[in-house]
Image (tube, rainbow, N blue to C red):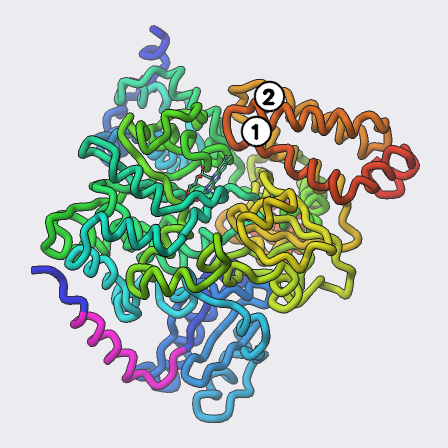
Amino acid sequence: MDRTTSEINPSGGMENRIGKYVDRFGQEEGCLIMILHAIQSDEGYIPREWVLELSLALGIPVARIYEVLTFYHFFKLTPQGKHNVVVCMGTACYLKGAADILKGVEENLGIKSGETTADRLFHIDVARCIGACGIAPAVKIDDEVIGKATAEKIIERLNQIKALEGGNGN
Amino acid sequence: MATNLEQIKTEELARQEKIRATFKICMGSGCLSSKSDALAEKLTAIFAARGISNDCEVKPVGCRGLCAVGPLVRYTDKDVLYSEVKEADLESIADDISRTPCGGKIVNTNSNFFKKQQKVVLDNAGSINPLRIEEYIAFGGYFALRKVLAEMSPGDVIETISRSGLRGRGGAGFPTGTKWKLLAEASGDEKYVICNGDEGDPGAFMDRSIMEADPHKIIEGMAIAGYATGSKKGYIYVRAEYPLAVKRLEIAIEQATKLGFLGKNIFDANFSFEIKLRLGAGAFVCGEETALIASIEGKRGNPSPRPPFPTQSGLFGKPTMINNVETLGNITRIIRDGAEWFASIGTEKSKGTKVFALTGHVANTGLVEVPMGMTLREIIFDIGGGVANGKKFKAVQTGGPSGGVIPEEHLDTPISYESLAALGSIMGSGGMLVMDEDDCMVDVAKFYLQFCVDESCGQCSPCRIGGYQMLKILEKIIKGRGEIGDLDKLEKIARAMKTASLCGLGQTAANPVLSTLKYFRQEYISYIEGGVKYARQMKRG
Ligand SMILES: Cc1cc2nc3c(=O)[nH]c(=O)nc-3n(C[C@H](O)[C@H](O)[C@H](O)COP(=O)(O)O)c2cc1C
Ligand code: FES
């Protein structure tokens, strides 16, 4: 893996960037997943350069880190949209028409679940239960959970966001 | 000096005594989604404007269960529950302090939804502010931990848990006392207690609500487990999809450490215990204990064959025990109120209560806790208010992707681990999905199977290939292109998966298909005989 070193961000600052995460968890056995969570929470996804740096810092081979990253649905390897729309497709939501909501959102944004709009404003994902089954169907837009959702209700919310972002709201 | 529990309790109760009116606002995930946090702010502002902030309190609390009509506000001094509260209602609700309550939409708390429930695990949920350890202590919190450390030997604790008849609430129903004993007897002085908060069933939120509403109860339960089994370290593994639970547990661990309920020489006893949080990352299989251990070790969540069982060789190769959140949520009450009290609730072999997440087409969706032995009919119709929108009941699904459906004719079955298994379903972790006459059983079976196929770790072929093949057959049937021989094929593959899969995921993945075939075979046959035309009619073609 000699490309490891050459791919690393030449602008440096690596110790600082990774250091704060390694300091926080690095002493504990099995801390890799916690560090990945912290990075994703700050960066929105796990950039490749970070994996390379992490590999050096923790002494875990890059391949092993990717093995972990690709196993867990939660980790994202590419940048997500500015706004994340998560449609719950857990059982309770599915039974109450989540599939129609997903279809409505996909049509409104012109992308499929797992994709990001060209302007990087929106990303759609499906979840398997976000624990709001009591108010199913549930949709999460960024940190906001919308219960008893309908396609109309969600699209209205999306249009509000588009308007705020200065888009044309189509 | 150990923390003086009595003093904290007395001070907190005295503080509460001085308050003339307490308004508890649900801050569970359900009610939060309808902006209950904004309600709390507004009501606080109203009290300030009226100059009554000194003796009127707005208290954020966890889930009370009736999520269907949230956000909920409870005025405890007059025992009034307001549902679907809007900001505009708040002035009038505040007026209720000085009159017979008539503001907002008042819920009848004498209804079966409340009366037929029995709260043990959820006794504090919705009553205390989960962010204040003083309130937990005022309700008897940490007295059980002090009691075991002062008065009981580890063996006594295990014996008490065994005598209570408590069985694991994570699905399999293994006797908890026996599990503790296995860990206690394992050699070595590095041992681990893990709390399983992965809650994988995609339609259930019992554990989430417990962790959010009463995090200290889990911490205290774990510390007691640590003492009984000779472990010094515990991990709580929580799914990443539950950020609020994570936050509240973090705060609770910090508070408990500060007061000396975690850390070195707890209550001046020769016992030290610490707890770390670990996050899942969206993999269902990580709820399975060996996969969970791999995940805490920072690896892919691949299950491994048992034996060795975790109590022999678990986390980092050390003896380890995994208990579900709700299981641990029962411990403090068993210690405080006694094994006999606990064993007096429930059936012969299934003791205590069970928390269920009532969802689907039932009127009162939400969280309920009932004594074991209650019938499904009582839960769904008396507590749940029956099927929503006047439709006809068709079936209830329990146990999520590892469980099965139960039709109308078996609704009078008293729930227990054994009775549900006899019906071809399982108790599971507590998801209870109600389906009405319009719901298609073939589609529901396909939904669960799809879930298991997506979540299979791919290590063993019965699960990886068997699941995929079954799914292809189901897709064919639901598109109206199936043949009658397909049903036998489904059953044959299901049997192979059950006997030959490596872990519980594969072993149980076919259950939803098998149980719908058992009770609703005709629906499959309708697709097969009706062909493409029928499938189109059902909007599946
Ligand atoms: C595929 C699979 C998923 C599981 N998911 C969970 C889960 O989310 N939560 C849980 O407590 N147990 C889950 N279990 C059961 C655990 O393996 C384990 O039996 C349980 O956590 C033990 O705790 P208990 O004895 O207190 O029930 C799962 C099992 C399997 C096979
Ligand atoms: S199934 Fe959607 S929140 Fe649980």
Q: Which residues are magenta?
A: B6-22
Dominant secondary-structure state across the stretch colored magenta: helix
Q: Amino acid at mark 2?
A: Pro
Q: Residue at x 45, y 56 (%)?
A: B351
* Number of dots carrying numbers: 2
B497 w.r.t. B339: above or below: above
Q: Secondary structure at mark 2?
A: helix
Where is residue A3? Give x, y as percent.
37, 8
Q: Is residue A61 covered in magenta? A: no
Give whichever of B37, A60 is nearer the camera.
Answer: A60
Residue matched to label 1: B506
| Image mark for residue A95 | none
| Image mark for residue B462 | 2
Give whichever of B454, B470 is nearer the camera.
Answer: B470
Quadrant holding the N terminus of chain A: top left
Where is residue B388? Give x, y as percent.
71, 63
Q: Residue at x 16, y 46 (%)?
A: B272
Q: Residue at x 32, y 30 (%)?
A: B314
- The image quadrant that residue A153 belongs to is bottom right
B411 sits to left or right of B44: right
User: Label 1: how many residues lie within 10 Å, few (<14), some (14-19) or many (20+)?
Assistant: many
